[in-house]
Image (cartoon, rainbow, N blue to C red):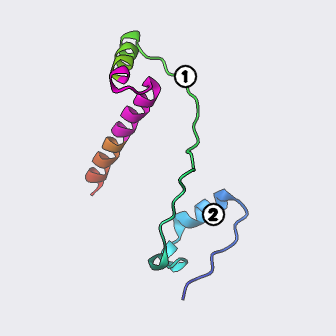
Amino acid sequence: MLKDIPTFESEDEEREFWASHDSTEYVNWGKGEMAYFPKLKPSTKSISLRLPEMMLAELRLIANKRDVPYQSLIKVFLQERINQELRQQKKLAA
């Protein structure tokens, strides 16, 4: 028998609850279905980033050869590196 999920006053309260409770006591994950949100866009935040002029020129050159905007290329490069770092940390933790 599954426990009832409590009502939360705030997202912080809910976050604290799920950080300290096992969700399998509240949710039957075996009945879960994949959900798709094709029009959902991740929120973005503008930042100011200072790069050496030569590095920026090289990024623009690579982006031009790939026919993509250089800022999009920077995001791809950053995501690839983040994924690599996370995989390495996971291996070290295992």
Above/below status of 77 relative to 12: above
Q: Residues within 10 Å of mark 2 (few under 14, many from 20)?
A: few
Q: Which mark is residue 14?
A: 2
Q: Describe residue 25's horizontal placement relative to residue 65 as left or right.
A: right
Q: Describe residue 50's horizontal placement relative to residue 92 as left or right.
A: right
Above/below status of 25 relative to 55: below
Q: Quadrant of residue 78?
A: top left
Magenta span: chief secondary structure: helix
Q: Which residue type carries mark 2?
A: Glu
Asked whether the beta carbons under mark 1 and mark 2 sit within 8 Å of each other, the answer is no
Above/below status of 78 relative to 40: above
Q: CA distance from mark 1 to mark 2?
A: 33 Å
Query: What residue is drawn where x is 51% and y is 79%?
Result: 25
Query: What residue is drawn where x is 46% and y is 26%?
Result: 71
Quadrant in which the C terminus is drawn: bottom left
Q: Which residue is mark 1?
A: 48
On whether residue 62 falls in the magenta region, the answer is: no
Residues drawn in magenta:
63-82
Q: Describe residue 25's horizontal placement relative to residue 52 as left or right.
A: right
Q: Quadrant of residue 61?
A: top left
Q: Position of residue 49 (x, y in %)?
A: 50, 21
On whether residue 70 falls in the magenta region, the answer is: yes
Q: Which mark is residue 2?
A: none
Q: Residues within 10 Å of mark 1 (few under 14, many from 20)?
A: few
Q: Which residue type carries mark 1?
A: Ser
Q: Describe residue 11's horizontal placement relative to residue 50 as left or right.
A: right
Quadrant in which the N terminus is drawn: bottom right
Q: Position of residue 91 (x, y in %)?
A: 26, 52
